């Protein structure tokens, strides 16, 4: 392990809720690795699986997740007992993760808007900067894997025009390009803070979400399989479902891909 990583791992284990770290110079997918060890009874959690490079990164809906050098790619392997959570509350964890990452990113790029796009994306200056892939490791939802991909130092300045229009990296907006390890530490600290806020202190998730929501008051289309709903977004419900005002009343969406129909 390079000295810089050794130092980072020591800081993560000393300063955050993470009890063990697996670091890889290269791996297929940190989520795949986390899922492969999740049911080992000897495995210590909460655990961070962190890779410098992924060659088979996965995104939502079966898409590939491509990330160049300088990106942050990692997965958290967590046991819901650590936070005394019932399985029905896991969808909220995905939203809490987005809020926590948005807060961490905003600290490094204070002059730009950082927003969350339901259910699992973080946007910086109107373009996607982070994707989150949450997966269950077992049918009883005992362990979950939260995969996080953040464009930190992998600049999009020289990327094709069509990619630049939809995605961005933190280094393209910061006077001093942030180091992935510093971003990772803040992400972990903010995640812990938000988990406590929402699940212990009972902070109202819809209100917290509202302050960063990219979609509120915008015309959107949500597609889930062959079904789609179109209307104006009114934030989220207490269980994390997206609320859409349609011609036939308010609809709740618990899954799906959102497309913005009105310009940012
Ligand atoms: C998405 O927006 O589609 C979610 C992307 C999630 C990517 C991360 S990178 C680390 C972890 N390992 C993976 O294979 N995927 C997630």
Image (cartoon, rainbow, N blue to C red):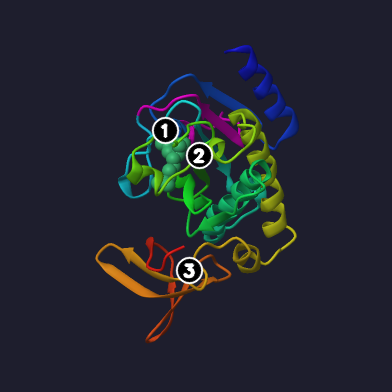
Instruction: Choose mark 2 or mark 1, whichever is in front.
Output: 2
Q: Is residue 236 left or right of residue 11?
A: left
Residues 239 and 39: in front is 239
- Disc on res. 67: 1
The residue tagged 3 is 242
**Callout 3: 10 Å neighbours few (<14), some, many (20+)?**
many
Q: What residue appears at the point 45 percent right and 36 percent down from the top-left corner?
A: 157
Instruction: Based on the picture, tell me whether residue 51 belongs to the magenta stretch.
Output: yes
Instruction: Based on the picture, tell me whether residue 139 belongs to the magenta stretch.
Output: no
Residues 235 and 93: in front is 235
Q: In the image, is residue 248 above or below residue 121?
A: below
Magenta stretch, residue numbers: 37-55
The residue tagged 2 is 169
Q: What residue appears at the point 64 percent right and 47 percent down from the top-left corner?
A: 106
Q: Position of residue 148 (x, y in %)?
A: 51, 40
At numbered mark 2, what does the secondary structure look like: helix, strand or loop?
A: loop
How far is disc 1 from disc 3 in space, using C-alphas?
29 Å
Mark 2 or mark 1, which has the lower sequence index? 1
Magenta: main secondary structure equals loop
């Amino acid at each position: 392990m390079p000295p810089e990583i050794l130092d980072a791992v020591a800081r993560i284990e000393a300063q955050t809720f993470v009890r063990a770290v697996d670091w890889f110079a290269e791996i297929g997918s940190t989520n795949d690795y986390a899922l492969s060890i999740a049911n080992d009874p000897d495995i210590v959690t909460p655990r961070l699986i962190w890779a410098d490079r992924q060659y088979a990164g996965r995104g939502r809906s079966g898409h590939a997740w491509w990330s160049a050098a300088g990106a942050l790619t990692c997965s958290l392997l967590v046991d819901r007992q650590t936070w005394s959570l019932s399985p029905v509350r896991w969808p909220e964890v995905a939203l809490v993760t987005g809020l926590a990452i948005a807060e961490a990113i905003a600290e490094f790029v204070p002059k730009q808007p950082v927003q969350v796009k339901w259910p699992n994306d973080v946007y910086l200056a109107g373009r996607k900067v982070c994707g989150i892939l949450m997966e269950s490791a077992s049918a009883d939802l005992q362990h979950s894997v939260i995969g996080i991909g953040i464009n930190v130092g992998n600049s999009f300045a020289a990327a094709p025009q069509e990619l630049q229009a939809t995605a961005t990296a933190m280094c393209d907006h910061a006077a001093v390009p942030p180091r992935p390890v510093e971003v990772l530490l803040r992400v972990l600290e903010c995640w812990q803070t938000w988990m406590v806020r929402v699940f212990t202190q009972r902070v109202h998730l819809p209100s917290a979400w509202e302050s960063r929501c990219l979609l509120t008051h915008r015309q959107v289309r949500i597609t889930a399989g062959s079904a789609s709903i179109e209307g104006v977004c009114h934030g989220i419900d207490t269980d994390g479902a997206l609320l859409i005002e349609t011609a036939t009343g308010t609809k709740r969406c618990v899954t799906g891909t959102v497309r913005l129909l009105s310009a940012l």
